[in-house]
Image: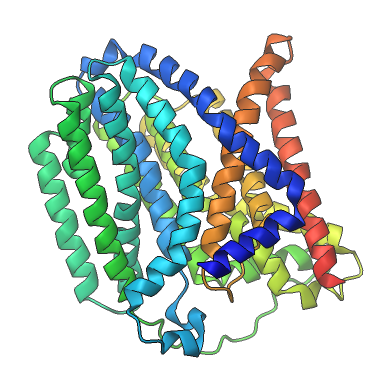
Amino acid sequence: MRCHLRHLRVVVAGAPLPAAVAVAGVALAPLAFVRIGHMLGNGLAVAIAADGVADATVLGPALAAAVAGAALAAALPEPAAFGRQIAAAPFERAAGVLAVALVPLLAGGLAVAPSLLAAAVALGSRLPGGEGSGLALAAASLAAIPAGASLAEGWIAASRGRRRRPLLVGCATGAWLSVGAALGAAPLGPLAVVGLALRGVVPSQAALAVSCASGVTLALGWVLLAATRPEKPATRSRRQRQLVRRRRGAIPAAITALLGRRGDVRLAAAGAVAFGAAGSGLAAVAAAPAPAAFLLGTTTALLGSLFCPLAAGGALLDGRWLWAGTPRGTAVVAEAAALVAVAGTAAPVGVVGAGAWVGSGASRSSAGVVAVLVVAGSATALLAGALVPWQRSGAGDQLTTFAAFAAIAVATSLAVGLVAPRLVATGLPDALVAGLVCGLSGAAALSVLGRRLRRAVG
C-alpha cells in the first residue's frame, strides 16, 4: 500500500495541474449529478410502474459495473509480478490481492462513489420508493462490480485449461439466475429486489440490506478466486512474421502488435463484446423500444473496450527502445497510438452495435452519439494511461491507472455537462459541439502522451 501511495505522490508531483483539475472536478461532480438524477427521476416517475422499467433502471448501471469488474479482474497482476521475495513471504495470497487492490479501489471509489450516490438518491427521491430506494440502487451498482470480476475469473481459468473453477462459477451463476427469476428479473439475481423497492413494493431498507449483503459476499468470493488463480501456462515461441510491407504503416502496426499480444487486452475486448451483446439481448427480450437495445449494448461494450487506450501509454513506454530509432519523431508515434487506441475501442463497440442495429434498429443520431462517446472515451482513457502509465512490470500499477481514469472521466463529464449545453444554447450546431469535445479531449491526450514519450526516449 505504501508503494501505491508513493506512486500516486509521484504522479501528482509530475503533473500537478491535471491532478488539481481532476480533484476539483471530482469534488464538484456530485452537484451536477444531483441535477441529472432529478431529471431522470422526473422522466421515470410515471413510467416506473410499467413492466420492466424498474428492472431496466437497475440493470443499466449494474451491467456497466459488471463490465468494470471484469476489467478489474483482467488488470489484476499475475502472481509472478510480485517477485520471488514477496511471493515467498509468509502471508496468504488473499492478503496480497487485498494489498494490491485496496489503494486503487479506494481512489477509484472516492472518484466515482459520491457522484453515483448523488445521482441515485436524487433519482429515488422522485420515485415511489423514495431516497432510500435510490441508495439501494447505488449499492446494487457497486455490488455488481465483484460479480463481473468473478465471471472474469471463471473465464480466465477456463482459458488456462482448468475445469473445476469455471464449473463452480457456472453453478453460482445458475443460483443467481434462479433467485432473480423468483423475484421477476433473472439477470439481476437477488438485486431484483431493488427494482421492487423503486416501485414502492418492497421497503427500501430491505433492498439496501440485500444489496450490501450481496456485495460483501461477491467481494469475498472474488478475492478467494483471485487469490487462487491458476498460473499462466507456458507459451510456445512465436514464429516471426512481417507485419507490414510498406514503411508508412510500420508504426501503427508495431503498436497494434504490442497491444494485441497482451492477454489482458484480448480478454477485455472479448468481455466487452460478451457483456455488450448480453445487454442488447436483454433489452430486446424485454421488448424495450428502439434504440434502447442499441444504446445499452454499445455503451456497455464501450466500458470494456477502453482497456486498449488505457494500456497504450504503458505499451509505448515498454517499447521506448523501438521508438528511439524512428526518424519521424515521437509526435508521429503518439498520433499513431491515438489512432490505434480509437480503433481498438471502436472494434468491439462496432460488433455489438451492428448486431443490435440489425436486431432491434436504431437511428443515425443514436449512432452519432455512440461515435462521440467512443472518441471522447478513448481520448480520456489515453490521457489517464499517459499520466499513470499501465506498466506490466509493476504490481498494481494497472489498478492505479483505473483509479486515475475514473477521476479524469468524472471531471471530464462534469466539464462537458456544464459547457456543452451552453454552447448549443448560443446556436452552435450539435455536430460542431461534439467535434469540439472530441478535438479538445484528443489534443489533451496527444499532448500529454507525446511529452511523456519524449522524456522516456530522451
The answer to whether 374 appears left or right of 162 in the picture is right
- Looking at the rendering, which quadrant does residue 377 occupy? top right
Q: Is residue 226 above or below residue 337?
A: below
Quarter the C terminus occupies = bottom right
Number of numbered discs overlaid on the protein picture: 0
- Whether residue 224 is visible, yes or no, is yes
Report x, y in % for residue 251: 77, 66
Q: Residue at x 11, y 40 (%)?
A: 181
- Looking at the rendering, which quadrant does residue 48 occupy? top left
Q: Residue 198 or 184: which is nearer the viewer?
A: 198
Q: Is residue 260 above or below residue 50?
A: below
Q: Residue furthest left?
A: 182
Report x, y in % for residue 281: 31, 40
Q: Residue at x 10, y 47 (%)?
A: 178
Report x, y in % for residue 126: 33, 14
Q: Residue furthest front?
A: 2
- Looking at the rendering, which quadrant does residue 25 occupy? top right
Q: Residue at x 36, y 21 (%)?
A: 123
The colour scheme used to paint the residues is: rainbow
Q: Residue 281 or 310: which is nearer the viewer?
A: 310
Q: Residue at x 43, y 50 (%)?
A: 68
- Whether residue 273 is visible, yes or no, is no
Report x, y in % for residue 423: 71, 16
Q: Residue furthest right?
A: 327
